[in-house]
Image (cartoon, rainbow, N blue to C red):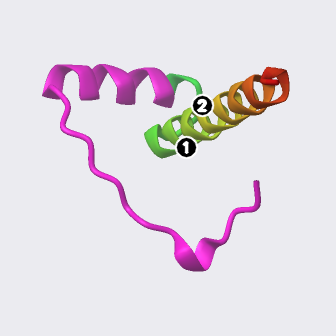
Amino acid sequence: MTEDLDKTVRVQVPMAEELRNKFKSVTAAEGKTMSEVILNFVKDYVEDKTEEKQAKSSRQP
């Protein structure tokens, strides 16, 4: 997947403040930002789901 920085958009997710604070603390302890971790999760999720869909399509008669 190619990343086009000119077309970057912002996504907002409602989240409990306590969860957000814990998430920020954990990511900081890993030397990462919350955005990095979320972006990597989304990329992995999309890749996994795309592969699943392709696998299902190839099995159908």
Magenta-drawn stretch contains 6: yes
Q: Amino acid at mark 1?
A: Leu
Would you name the residue on which mark 1 appears?
39
Would you name the residue on which mark 2 appears?
45
Given contact means CB atoms under 8 Å apart, are the residues at marks 2 and 1 in contact? no
Q: Amino acid at mark 2?
A: Tyr
Question: Which residue shows up at 27% across the image and 50% down it?
Answer: 12
Chain-order first, disc 2 or disc 1:
1
Q: Residue 7 versus residue 35: which sits nearer the camera? A: 7
Which quadrant does the N terminus fall into?
Answer: bottom right
Instruction: Answer with the quarter of the image where residue 18 lies.
Output: top left
Q: Residue 21 location in percent, x, y?
A: 26, 26
Q: Residue 56 location in percent, x, y?
A: 73, 23
Q: Residue 26 location in percent, x, y?
A: 45, 20
Question: What whole-number distance in Å separates the C-alpha atoms at marks 2 and 1?
Answer: 10 Å
Q: Secondary structure at mark 2?
A: helix
Q: Which mark is residue 23?
A: none
Q: Residue furthest front?
A: 61
Mark 2 surroundings: few (<14), some (14-19) or many (≥20) residues within 10 A: few
Question: Which residue shows up at 31% across the image and 19% down it?
Answer: 22
Q: Is residue 41 above or below residue 56?
A: below
Q: Residue 10 location in percent, x, y?
A: 37, 61
Q: Secondary structure at mark 1?
A: helix
What residue range appears in magenta?
Answer: 1-28
Q: Residue furthest left?
A: 17
Mark 1 surroundings: few (<14), some (14-19) or many (≥20) residues within 10 A: few
